[in-house]
Amino acid sequence: MKTKKRKKFSLVYCLKNWYRDLSMASKISTVFLTMLIPMIILMAMWFLNVLRYNEYYNSAVKNTYAISEFNLDFKANYDYKIYLIVAGNKTYEFQNPEVDIEKARRILAMVGHDSKNKESLKRIQDTEKNLANLKKYTLMIRDNMKEGGKYDENREIWETGVQAITSMIQQNVLEILYYENQESAIVYERIQKMTVQMVIISIIILVLFLGAAVLMITYIPKTITKPVSQLRKVTEQAAKGDLTVRAEVEYGAELKVLGDSFNTMIEHMALLLERVTEEQSNLREAELEILQMQINPHFLYNTLDTIVWLAEADDKEAVVNMVETLSDFFRSSLNGGKDIVSIGEETRHIASYLQIQKVRYQDILEYSIQIPTELNHYEIPKITLQPLVENALYHGIKNKRGKGKIRVFGYEEAGEGILVVEDNGIGMKKERLLQVQRRITYREGDKKDFYGLYNVNERIRLKFGDEYGLKIDSSYRQGTRVEVHLPARQNDALKN
């Protein structure tokens, strides 16, 4: 008993799991087939049974009709035909009674082929024997007629032989007719019983259909609407900002995929939110670093010290130029608090910076700025080039013996505005260059060593996307080249 219960439970469990994993289209098809297939089977059974019994009934009716026709005509016609032959009123050839015997045999053969009644078949065999005897007597009369002068013998054969056999044939035929009618009644009764049975079976199946339909109507929509309702509640929670929720869908292949996709989307949203939060924090740090660069006390101290030195040398024109350049530098640094400026404004800012540094490092520094005017209205984050030029001066030119040169230029290529800061300073070894590139491109390693480059690159990425930013190349004792890749995008507000 326990084994049977376990098997039953296992079967139900398997069917439940199978149904649970079906798609909604498969569920609807399953419901349709579950109701359609039994109906088709019922209709097929009904049709086949009706067809079979109808065939039986038709055979019995046809046999009854054929036997009735045989019974009504055969004896009277045959006896009269033989009488006319014996009396000499008609010739044997004209009457041809053998045709009637052959016709009777064909009728009996047809009835015997279709009949299912054993008694009828027995009577048919007896009648066929009687027909054989009848033919024998008929041929005797024929032979006597050919010889002639045997009227009395032929009359006796007709009276005692032919009429006796036709009487037996008529009796057999009546019995065959009785049994065939009985068979028709039996078939009709079977049809009536079959009809009643089919009606009862139909009612039972209809009740089962109704029960199954009620179960399907209540259960199947539940397996579809319940997970949809769960997904709706989860999406409402997610829309309110709760990214810890997860969809747990048990039924329906499509809904499972939808739930898994929703969970994946929520996880990605959480990761993106975390990344945006981190990047915003990095951006604030970068902006703070830029602000510190703007008011770099060492740069300001050195510049003021240079102005004092020029004043002591009584070079009034140089002092005025230096003060004006310093004023332009800080004016462009502040720039009304805007974070995005035009390349033209950025060029003026870097020009002020290099002009100031040229006064201080005139023995070791040369520079050139060659940025096409068509790039002037493109957008760029404020104070992008100054940290790059500062790195070129302090880490490239100053570490090299002799005079160095910083070259700032730009061009447009493949929908990008590209600015280049290039120096012929000490450069970097391959290991160092690889560290810088990994940190700038893949955010790998400690950013403290490359804070200025990292901040510039991150600010460009945050503003324009990860496909933009810095590209660095360097050769030891030959120099360094830093490319700034920006979208070739103009802002009409920056033209004013």
Image: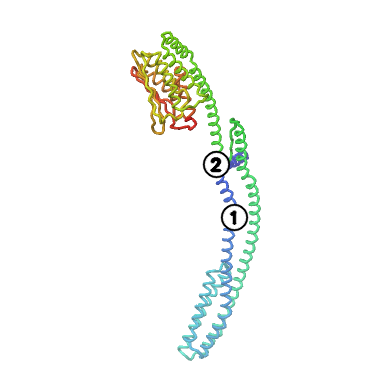
> Tag 2, which secondary structure?
helix
Image quadrant assignment for residue 24: top right
Residue 226 against residue 397 in the figure, above or below: below
Q: Give the amino acid at mark 2.
A: Glu
Q: Position of residue 47 (x, y in %)?
A: 58, 61
CA distance for labels 1 and 2: 30 Å
Residue 182 against residue 287 in the figure, above or below: below
Q: Is 380 displayed left or right of 75 in the figure? A: left
Residue at image location 59% in from the left, 53% down from the top:
38
Quarter in which the N terminus is drawn: top right
Q: Give the amino acid at mark 1.
A: Met
Residue at image location 51% in from the left, 25% down from the top:
338
Q: Position of residue 114 (x, y in %)?
A: 54, 69
Identify the mark at residue 254; answer none if there is no mark. 2
Q: Nearer the viewer, mark 1 or mark 2?
A: 2
Characterize the local packing of mark 2: few (<14), some (14-19) or many (20 or more) Cα atoms within 10 angstroms. Answer: some
Q: Nearer the viewer, residue 102 or 238?
A: 238
Q: Is 332 displayed left or right of 30 in the figure? A: left
Image quadrant assignment for residue 76: bottom right
Q: Position of residue 43 (x, y in %)?
A: 59, 58
Of callouts 1 and 2, the N-terminal one: 1
**Snapshot colouring:** rainbow
Residue at image location 63% in from the left, 52% down from the top:
209
Q: Nearer the viewer, residue 71 or 484?
A: 484
Characterize the local packing of mark 1: few (<14), some (14-19) or many (20 or more) Cα atoms within 10 angstroms. Answer: some
Q: Nearer the viewer, residue 448 or 177?
A: 448
- The answer to whether mark 1 and mark 2 are in CB contact below 8 A is no
Q: Nearer the viewer, residue 72 or 252?
A: 252
Q: Which residue is mark 1?
A: 39
Q: Position of residue 379 (x, y in %)?
A: 46, 29
Residue reaching furthest top?
A: 312
> Tag 1, which secondary structure?
helix
